Image (tube, rainbow, N blue to C red):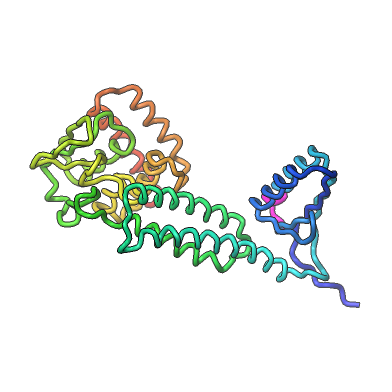
Amino acid sequence: MTAPQAGRNWLVLVFQFPKGAGSERVKIWRRLQSMGAVAIKNSMYLLPRSEQAQEDFEWLVAELTASGAETALLESRFISGLDDPQLREMFNTARNRDYAELKQHIDTVNTDLAPGTTAGTEALQSARQALVRARKRLADIEAIDFFGAPELEGAQASLWALDERLAAPAAPGAGGDKSMTDSSATKLRNRVWVTRRNVRVDRIASAWLIRRWIDPDARFRFVDGRDHEPGANEVRFDMFEAEFTHQGDQCTLEVLARHVAAEDDALRCVGEIVHDIDLKDHKFGRPETEGVASLLSGLVASLEDDERRIERGSALFEDLYQHFRNLSA
């Protein structure tokens, strides 16, 4: 008799709740969904064998046991009945469903912003928040997409389409980088750069970029409110109706960097850190972000003068920029 061909290793979690544990069932079901486990029978769930999967299931076993459930965690190979291709297809079916639901949601948001529709400030802000949530949801699904479900590409395409639409240049008079569309960095020299008082993360970083890439002798002016009318030689940044300010889900530094040094990978890395600190959306999740945020918080707390904040902050961002340049060298 020929021995059955060995398949891959799987982890199988089997459990049985005592009667009347309805709320616990729902909680455990949600936990299993977040892990990406699929049900092969009632109260029997499967994950492909890995250290992370074993750790996830072991934590769940402890939780199940504490709630009075009977549990067993098995490492198995399937040799009859279900085979590995069928099991992989079960996982892909579940992830395809997740991707399709996400794509449908993103497409609805994108349709609401389509040319010819009226998208006011509140609608744009809602779309930006939806983009942040969709990006996180996509990352969560990818983390449990163990076998490369094909619907990923459709969800990614919809997300990129929404991202591009929100990053499109603002209409004249609506803020955004109006000057950069028809002016080179050279024409922005010998100007006074205006922003709000009490500069913090994005304004400090933008001031560093302005003096490093646009005008080393740039002068800054700090004003109180959103109603500042710019003088003939002034350029506003990171404030209401500024020539350079947030655009789509990009912070001011990212907008400036896109125009003055779009191919600079080190500057892009700095921009990702500033983005996550300023917008608090954890879009990029760089490991340096928390430390840079703490340094900037201490800088702002210790200095009240905006020029001094820019001076000290510029040294910090220059060192950070050189760090990333060295990594890519």
Q: Name the side, left or right, on which 124 lies relative to 170.
A: right
**Can you see residue 130?**
yes
Residue at the spot 35% in from the left edge and 51% down from the top edge = 124
Q: Residue furthest bottom?
A: 1
Q: Is residue 299 above or below residue 217?
A: above
Give the quarter of the image for residue 78.
bottom right
Q: Name the side, left or right, on which 218 lies relative to 113.
A: left
Image location of residue 260, percent across then percent down: 24, 52
Q: Residue furthest right?
A: 1
Quadrant containing the N terminus is bottom right
Residue at the spot 30% in from the left edge and 63% down from the top edge = 116
Front one among 325 and 232: 232
Q: Name the side, left or right, on which 232 lies relative to 179.
A: left
Image location of residue 314, percent across then percent down: 28, 35
Residue at the spot 37% in from the left edge and 39% down from the top edge = 278
- Per the rendered image, the range of residues in magenta is 49-54
Image location of residue 108, percent across then percent down: 45, 60
Q: Is residue 75 above or below residue 310?
A: below
